[in-house]
Amino acid sequence: MIAAAGARLAHMLPPETAHALTIRMLTYGAGVPAHAPQLPVSTRVELPKSGLRLCSPVGLAAGFDKNCEVPEAMAKFGFGFVECGTVTPKPQPGNPRPRLFRLTEDRAVINRMGFNNFGLDYFVRRLANYSHDVPIGANVGANKDSDDRIGDYVTGIEAVAPYANYITINISSPNTPGLRGLQDKASLTELLARCGAADRNALPVFLKVAPDLDADAIADICAVVRGEGAWLSGLIVSNTTLARPPSLRSEEKSEAGGLSGAPLFEPSTEVLRQFARALEGGFDLIGAGGIGSGRDAYAKIRAGASAVQLYSLMVYDGPGIAARVAHELSHCLAEDGFSSIADAVGKDI
Ligand SMILES: Cc1cc2nc3c(=O)[nH]c(=O)nc-3n(C[C@H](O)[C@H](O)[C@H](O)COP(=O)(O)O)c2cc1C
């Protein structure tokens, strides 16, 4: 995924092989620019509740760099923030392969990786060595075989807090059985009480939610977030979806797992808007799901996001997508007479 051409070349390999090779090449610096590209001034933003200051609101979503191996490289491609993980306390292999599928005709991906990762010790060693001024987020999760999943989040938070710029509590992966149950009212209340009491070094913490939530579930989550979760900085909306829109054309559309990329754009933006409406500006929202252009990022911002993240469309367009989206976004702002991101946040709520 060194450039758009690299992305096309990588598509000649099975998806997980291509991904592993990409990470390997990036660790050697192959194709990585010496410096981050110049980004438009109008896309600088400070997230109001967390205080995170970003040179661009376009971040790298979790899942690409699960073990925190290439965050500097991704910063140099022009991402305004980089999220690594999901990391679990103990290393785990994840689900059997194949577990990653390209839906090329749909510009989408299905994955059922199942939190494959090298564990917290490895992750924290890498995180402690990170040396770039682009903020880095650590996305924490629970082991599949854990007896105390909430305890796993507390362990993760306390281990990464000395080194990260923010933390994400991921309770929305569809590939660890039962994990999304932590979004239910009683479980979420307990999770946020215990994580709120964790030693988190006063870092901003975000809760990452699924797009597969009805109005009642969204209302419940917002009630708990406003109550027990009032200490949170905000929400990341959203993770991958279990839904399969009828428009999907690719052969792999029936594979089990979470769908991401272009078909996730509309539903995840709608769920984001509902969270923005319910939370009324009290929390920072980060929009993710199907972003491939500045116009997509702009729509998320108008729906209530102060920043956005992407992963799947980078698989198709290469890492240059980070700077391209930022430049296109600055044009969208200018077209509508906005001089900053903050002016456009929530205009379509
Ligand atoms: C292969 C793959 C692995 C992912 N792994 C994680 C993960 O470990 N933790 C997480 O919070 N999200 C994970 N995600 C979800 C993304 O971070 C993002 O929320 C989602 O894919 C929507 O954005 P996108 O359409 O731009 O990919 C993964 C996504 C993909 C495609």
Image (spheres, rainbow, N blue to C red):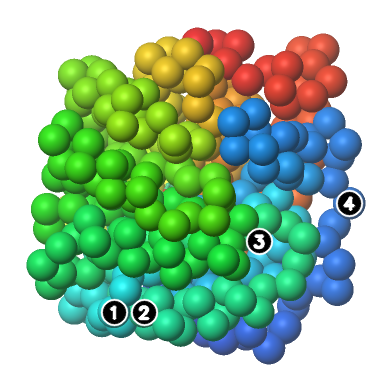
Label 3 vs 1, first from the N-terminus: 1
| Circle 2 Cα neighbour tier, 10 Å, few/some/many (<14 / 14–19 / ≥20) | many
Which residue occupies the foreground of this view, 34 or 189?
189
Tell me how far mark 4 sits from mark 1, CA to CA: 39 Å
Asked where in the image residue 104 lies, by quadrant, the reply is bottom left
Residue 349 seen from this side:
yes
Which residue occupies the foreground of this view, 338 or 3?
338
Question: Looking at numbered disc 2 in the image, what kind of residue is underneath it?
Answer: Gly
| Circle 4 Cα neighbour tier, 10 Å, few/some/many (<14 / 14–19 / ≥20) | few
Question: Looking at numbered disc 3 in the image, what kind of residue is underneath it?
Answer: Pro
- Mark 2 touches mark 1? (CB < 8 Å): yes
- Mark 3 touches mark 1? (CB < 8 Å): no
Tell me how far mark 2 sits from mark 4, CA to CA: 35 Å
Which residue corresponds to mark 4? 38
Tell me how far mark 3 sits from mark 2, CA to CA: 26 Å
Label 3 vs 4, first from the N-terminus: 4
Q: Is residue 247 above or below residue 109?
A: above
Asked where in the image residue 301 lies, by quadrant, the reply is top right
- Mark 4 touches mark 1? (CB < 8 Å): no
Q: Nearer the viewer, mark 4 or mark 1?
A: 1
Question: Looking at numbered disc 1 in the image, what kind of residue is underneath it?
Answer: Lys
Name the disc covering residue 90, or none. Answer: 1
Residue 289 seen from this side:
no
- Looking at the rendered structure, the secondary structure element under dot 4 is loop
Name the disc covering residue 119, or none. Answer: 2
- Mark 3 touches mark 4? (CB < 8 Å): no
Note whether ligand 1 is within 8 Å of mark 4. Answer: no
